[in-house]
Image (spheres, rainbow, N blue to C red):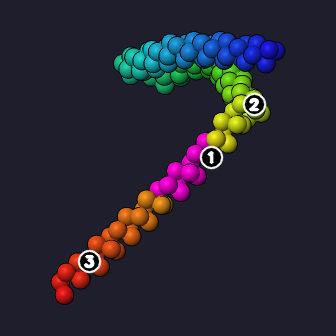
């Protein structure tokens, strides 16, 4: 009975991790949107800089602002990606443990043995049917030759 509770707990834990992964994916989309806006603002600022006399200084300032904003986004992404890797590892470990539990289950083992036995029997039956078909074909060819004579 303890095993059942562990498996149920594992299933719920996997759902929680998957929900958190979905949340991380949504946050990543928002960060991608922010990144696009930052890039857009950089492009606009650079276009404005070309109209000014001190173009190089203006471009440097625009690039500095861009780097500062991107640094904040990268810091957020780093934390999210670390958590994402940890969650995926947890889910992978849970799935592995579930497969191990299924392999150790005597009922599943018996079911696998029966499946193997049924498969082998089907192969034997198919080989027997093919042999019967080949035999009938050979007999039909022999009769056809006799009828020609």
Give the mark, 3 or 2, whose residue is nearer the N terminus. Answer: 2
Residue at numbered disc 2:
105
In the image, is residue 139 above or below residue 101?
Answer: below
Q: Quadrant of the C terminus?
A: bottom left
Left or right, 11 with respect to 141, comes to right
- Give the camera-side residue of 114 and 23: 114
In the displayed structure, does residue 1 sit left or right of residue 70?
right
Give me the disc on residue 74: none
Q: Residue furthest bottom?
A: 149
Q: Which mark is residue 116?
A: 1
Q: Which mark is residue 143?
A: 3
> Which comes sooner in the sequence, label 3 or label 1?
1
Residue 144 visible here: yes
View extreme (right): residue: 2
Q: Secondary structure at mark 1?
A: helix
Q: Nearer the viewer, mark 3 or mark 2?
A: 3
Q: Nearer the viewer, residue 36 or 99?
A: 99
- Mark 3 is surrounded, within 10 Å at the Cα level, by few (under 14), some (14 to 19) or many (20 or more) other residues, namely few
Whether 78 is drawn above or below 127: the answer is above
Q: Residue at x 24, y 83 (%)?
A: 146
Tell me the element at label 2: loop
């Amino acid at each position: 009975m303890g095993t059942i509770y562990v498996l149920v707990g594992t299933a719920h834990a996997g759902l929680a991790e998957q929900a958190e992964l979905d949340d991380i994916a949504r946050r990543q989309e928002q960060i991608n949107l922010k990144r696009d806006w930052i890039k857009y603002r950089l492009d606009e600022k650079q276009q404005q800089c070309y109209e000014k006399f001190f173009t190089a200084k203006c471009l440097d300032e625009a690039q500095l602002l861009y780097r500062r904003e991107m640094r904040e986004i990268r810091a957020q992404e780093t934390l999210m990606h670390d958590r994402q890797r940890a969650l995926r590892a947890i889910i992978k470990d849970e799935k592995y443990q579930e497969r191990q539990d299924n392999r150790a289950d005597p009922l599943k083992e018996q079911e696998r043995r029966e499946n193997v036995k049924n498969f082998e029997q089907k192969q034997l039956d198919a080989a027997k049917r093919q042999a019967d078909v080949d035999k009938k074909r050979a007999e039909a060819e022999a009769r056809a030759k006799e009828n020609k004579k």
